[in-house]
């Protein structure tokens, strides 16, 4: 009798779980939790805002509210929004209007597209549009992680682009910290901005452990001082694959309960492993490697956020398909928080190409339809938490499904 009364209530609460977290978030052992210590599982999608024009992608294709409704409709509760340091340190760049920035790259069609879909953005400055995107996400209760992707706007990443590690041409540590502090300050009163990842995909010949501790700790403190509410997310070596140095030495920070680590994993991260080996064996070996490099962190009591992963959604890449099976099992088993690469169906301008299609994009070229609905079905299983639910501390998702079945 009681069960009958309670079940519909449970289902309602489960369905609404992504909508009303008590923010800000913090960490509790390896889990991200809300103010009531209930788990919040991040099921995010990457939304790109760091390319040459520094305009959040897609705004010439669809009205912003339509895009955000799609994000929610596809089951994501959060966006990892990428940004370049110059957006907050370089006034002559940040004060350009969208129109001017597009004109600089000859993107006249996108000017017409913005006029049609988001007319109020056309003559706003780049920084104002970035703020407007964050505000729209917040109004729609989609959580935001601000990801410093690089310093100088453009496609990321190569070992020699000058944005890879402390001391590179565009990566002077104090300048970077100054940028982080400005961005943290800009959104300090918006509780919906729940995290900041300090730098995307460290890489290149300058990588070294001493500088990592020195500057990551400094950057983390600067962000935390400017906005003590946000989760501070740290990335590792070799395109965010390797945090193994933390086996021996933890980071030292003045604060607790806000520290998260991130990792990226694609099929191409494993070089050609997927091409030749037996998929089961390769999966076993690759997972072992990831466990050694990053997967040990939850055991040490830190959340691990898989902040980039994804596949060619045309479904024709055999390596990607083998990787995907392996990846989904791994994420599901450990119930990690994650962010898919990417929302973007096509870019305004990427690597010199106008209107480049993004086959990893969950939306199609025109940002209208889901590119591959089977893929969306597949990932729906990892969008819900397996462990913990933020309304019921002792009520796990596993229990919920067995109760309802
Ligand atoms: C500011 O940005 C513009 C456009 O990307 C660039 O040409 C200029 O060198 C930047 N200035 C500084 C001081 O970084
Ligand atoms: C796993 O790590 C070992 C040792 O570092 C390396 O030789 C091997 O290529 C890696 N395997 C895969 C599939 O990444």
Image (cartoon, grey):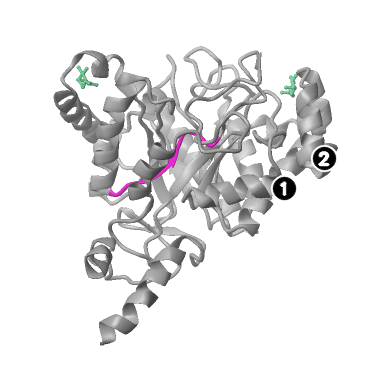
The residue lying toward the viewer, choosing from 207 and 296, is 296
From this viewpoint, which residue is outermost toward the right? Answer: 123
The magenta-colored residue range is 335-343
Q: Position of residue 148 (x, y in %)?
A: 56, 35
Which quarter of the figure is the C terminus placed in?
A: bottom left
- Name the residue carrying label 2: 124
Residue 276 vertical placement versus 172 (above, below): above
Question: Label 2 to label 1, Cα distance in Å?
Answer: 10 Å
Q: Is residue 322 left or right of residue 55?
A: left
User: Is residue 224 in view from this perspective?
Assistant: no
Is residue 337 located in the magenta-colored stretch of the structure? yes
Residue 30 vertical placement versus 99 (above, below): below
Which quarter of the figure is the N terminus placed in?
A: bottom left
Q: Could you tell me if the residues under marks 2 and 1 are in contact, i.e. CB atoms within 8 Å?
A: yes
CA neighbours of label 1 inside 10 A, class few (<14), some (14 to 19), many (20+): some
Who comes first in sequence, dot 2 or dot 1?
2
The residue lying toward the viewer, choosing from 214 and 389, is 389
Q: Tell me the residue at 62%/22% (across/down).
A: 154
Q: Where is residue 194 in the image (x, y as percent from the top left)?
A: 52, 53
From this viewpoint, which residue is outermost toward the bottom? Answer: 1
- Name the residue carrying label 1: 132
CA neighbours of label 2 inside 10 A, class few (<14), some (14 to 19), many (20+): some
Q: Where is residue 258 in the image (x, y as percent from the top left)?
A: 43, 54
Q: Total of numbered circles in the picture?
A: 2
Is residue 395 located in the magenta-colored stretch of the structure? no
Question: Within 8 Å of ligand 1, the CB of disc 1?
Answer: no
Q: Is residue 298 left or right of residue 181?
A: left
Q: Tell me the residue at 29%/39% (across/down).
A: 328
């Amino acid at each position: 009798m009681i069960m009958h009364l309670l079940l519909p209530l449970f289902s309602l609460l489960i369905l609404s779980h992504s909508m009303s977290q008590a923010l800000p978030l913090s960490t509790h052992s390896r889990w991200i939790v809300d103010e009531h210590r209930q788990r919040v599982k991040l099921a995010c999608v990457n939304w790109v805002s760091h390319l040459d024009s520094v305009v959040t992608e897609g705004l010439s294709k669809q009205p912003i509210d339509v895009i955000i409704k799609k994000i929610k409709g596809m089951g994501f509760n959060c966006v990892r929004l990428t940004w370049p340091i110059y957006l907050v340190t370089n006034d002559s760049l940040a004060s350009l209007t969208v129109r001017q920035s597009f004109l600089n790259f000859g993107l006249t069609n996108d000017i017409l597209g913005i006029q049609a879909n988001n007319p109020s953005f056309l003559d706003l400055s780049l920084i104002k549009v970035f703020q407007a995107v964050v505000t729209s996400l917040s109004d729609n209760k989609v959580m935001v992680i601000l990801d410093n992707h690089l310093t100088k706007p453009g496609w990321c990443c190569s070992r020699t682009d000058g944005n890879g590690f402390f001391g590179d041409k565009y990566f002077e540590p104090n300048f970077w910290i100054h940028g982080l502090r400005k961005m943290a300050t800009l959104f300090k009163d918006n509780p919906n901005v729940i995290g900041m990842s300090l730098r995307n995909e460290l890489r290149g010949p300058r990588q070294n452990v001493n500088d990592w501790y020195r500057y990551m700790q400094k950057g983390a403190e600067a962000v935390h001082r400017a906005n003590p509410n946000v989760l501070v997310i740290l990335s590792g070596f070799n395109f965010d694959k390797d945090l193994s140095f933390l086996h021996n030495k933890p980071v030292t920070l003045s604060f607790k309960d806000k520290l998260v680590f991130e990792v990226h994993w694609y099929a191409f991260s494993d070089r050609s492993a997927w091409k030749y080996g037996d998929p089961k064996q390769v999966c076993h070996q690759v997972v072992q490697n990831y466990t050694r490099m990053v997967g040990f962190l939850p055991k040490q009591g830190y959340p691990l956020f898989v902040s980039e992963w994804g596949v060619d959604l045309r479904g024709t890449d055999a390596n990607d398909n083998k990787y995907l099976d392996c990846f989904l099992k791994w994420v599901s088993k450990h119930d990690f928080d994650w962010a898919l690469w990417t929302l973007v169906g096509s870019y305004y301008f990427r690597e010199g190409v106008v209107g480049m299609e993004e086959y990893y994009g969950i939306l199609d070229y025109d940002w209208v339809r889901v590119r591959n609905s089977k893929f969306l079905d597949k990932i729906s299983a990892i969008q819900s938490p397996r462990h913990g639910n933020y309304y019921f501390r002792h009520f796990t998702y596993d229990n919920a499904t067995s109760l309802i079945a």
